[in-house]
Amino acid sequence: MSIGEFELIRRYFVRDKITVPGHPSVGTPQVTLGIGDDAALLEVPEGERLVVTTDTLVAGRHFLPNADPGDIAWKALAVNLSDLAAMSATPLAVTLNLTLPEADESWLAAFSTGFWNLADIYELPLVGGDTTRGPLSVTITAMGSVEQRYALRRSTAQIGDVICATGTLGDAGAGLALALYAFKQASLPLASDATAAALADEALLNLSDDHQDYLLDRLNRPSPRINSGVGVRGFASAGMDISDGLLQDLGHLLAASGVGAELEIDNLPLSDALKAYARTSLKAHAQARDWALSAGDDYELLLTIPPDKWQQLDNTPAIKSKLTAIGKVTKTLGLRLTKQGKAWEHEGLAGYQHF
Amino acid sequence: MSIGEFELIRRYFVRDKITVPGHPSVGTPQVTLGIGDDAALLEVPEGERLVVTTDTLVAGRHFLPNADPGDIAWKALAVNLSDLAAMSATPLAVTLNLTLPEADESWLAAFSTGFWNLADIYELPLVGGDTTRGPLSVTITAMGSVEQRYALRRSTAQIGDVICATGTLGDAGAGLALALYAFKQASLPLASDATAAALADEALLNLSDDHQDYLLDRLNRPSPRINSGVGVRGFASAGMDISDGLLQDLGHLLAASGVGAELEIDNLPLSDALKAYARTSLKAHAQARDWALSAGDDYELLLTIPPDKWQQLDNTPAIKSKLTAIGKVTKTLGLRLTKQGKAWEHEGLAGYQHF
């Protein structure tokens, strides 16, 4: 790495202190040694386990080639923090490996701003990484901690548990349709698998600017559910994040736990923006539901909670208000969709796989 | 990620148990939860700090485009383990992010073999990562642990300390010259910065096959000095690994510590292979010395050890035999080269920077 690159990194990524007034402090990182030596030293809270996850985002595959650098950084960090949230972990620190075609300072400035926008929310220190010249790619490794007994696994759902989700579902699917439409309008080249996704229809394009911005923001700057993940410690029996779509991810959880489930499609939590779209026609209603069931990139948490714990959560409305019950774990294997409690069949749902 | 890719990962990278009879067990990883959930859970030994480092290797930049996949994997892991060694850490676990143009099974098989060849030496578990389609790139994040008081920093060298290096220096420089020669013979396109390196001369090409293989192996499969790093706990006052060349890296250490040094060029540890080359001519002698001083990629440890501790190391010959004293830390800032104790000037040494 050249001296110039050292300087660029120092300018945008090395910070002595991270304080953001008004933001809640979730993590309590204790970085004994940060960037600048051969490796960083971290203190993992006594009695807790280190939680580690890592994800690479590649241009043209995980984000559109014209994506805003700040959005790329935010999302690369968010998908990793979402994995920590899915383990009920408190974030400790992250590392960043950035491969760039050229050391473009304005790009780096925008990228680092997006990165710190999210990292600062959790007072999350950047403790290592590197920059390399090459095709654009971002790898982030996130480290957190949690007591072993609170770590949320996928394989521990119990028959009778309430299945619930944080936030709202389907927004990122609608956001992707909007983003692809704008991308196509600009006549930019599209990766082959992106074309398979639905483009925005008239009703989506006629939503208010606020609603459209909201949906795009949900795609580009997902909120890792760290607070909810930490909040359900001692309540949830199993959990994971919803990155590939509810049906597919629930399928993974059920398979890992050796159980089945019923899912009530009328209980799927939809945002005001997606509801506004769904109200425009029967077709839009079905599309919104399908995005909620099978579009990826929402990065909400999928949790199973025993009925008695679900009741106890009434005492902590700040946590429970973020959760929506969408079904229950059954002894009968497989996944049955219901509408108002009655069996409901869905033909040809994108991303849906029987198992 | 497609189901096919899940299957590929499972086949080559998920292993239930890692045991290699005859190899020393340096790490004692306690992986509470490995690959397959949202994140991995690790236990960091009580009273120790987590040590984290990460590096990305990109095709055409960090390795020649025709490099053996097993060598790429080995080296990507080795450079990270070398950083752990430089902190005196014991390796705990690693994650691997692999970006590949296509899911080429024979390539993956060779890559994973090289990866496990090195990982198995330290019984090192792979606890996470991902595979992505895109231009070839490998990111490894290595985690280890060490008591805070034993962690080797760059900034803590003391005046009077013995400067020493593990192993031998300059081998990777000679190996690169051989590799570039073979590469050029095959008329393959060369990255612009690779052409700046010296090509092999007649004397190097006339070395025995054993010597040439040894030098290439030192370039392609460097040995992270984990055992030496752990061995000098409580002895060394500062340390780092030699990745960019002795003079440049020593410069970083001296600058961080606010001290100077004298370096005795006749004490540079050379391998039998490099000595055989150096004996062929005065020019070869100078070239071997310059590789030892300024060629990178050796991944030996550069350590400073107080004189009394240096003496005490006589009681542990297994450790001391791996170290060669090459100079001493001085109050006078800057780096002075000596030959047989007398000031020695070197003009035009590649990679040499005054500071």
Image: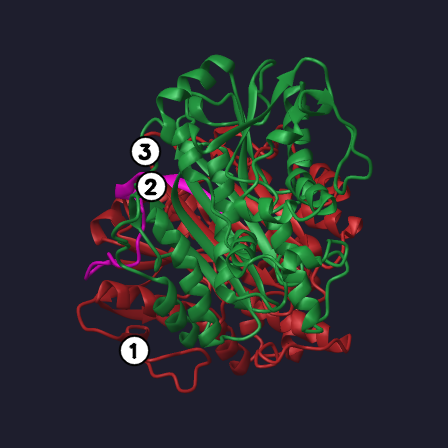
Chain colours: A green, B red
Report the amino acid beneath label 1: Phe
* Badge nearest the viewer, 3 or 2: 2
- Residue A311 visible in image: yes
Picture layout, residue A221 above or below residue A81: below
Residue at mark 1 to residue at mark 3: CA–CA distance: 41 Å
Instruction: Report the magenta residues as a range.
Output: B142-161
- Residue B135 visible in image: no
Q: Secondary structure at mark 1?
A: loop
Give the image location of residue B194, x and y in percent. Answer: 60, 76
Q: Is residue A192 left or right of residue B310?
A: right
Give the image location of residue A298, x and y in percent. Answer: 57, 44
Residue wearing tag 2:
A27
Report the amino acid beneath label 2: Gly
Chain where mark 2 sits = A
Quadrant in which the C terminus of chain A is drawn: top right
Give the image location of residue A1, x and y in percent. Answer: 47, 70
**Are the numbered discs 3 and 2 placed on the same chain, yes or no?**
yes
Give me the residue at 21% from left, 73% from top: B333
**Are the numbered discs 1 and 3 placed on the same chain, yes or no?**
no
Q: Is residue B152 magenta?
A: yes
Label ID, residue B355: 1
Residue wearing tag 3:
A45
From the image, give the main secondary structure of the stretch colored magenta.
loop
Q: Is residue B103 left or right of residue B290?
A: right
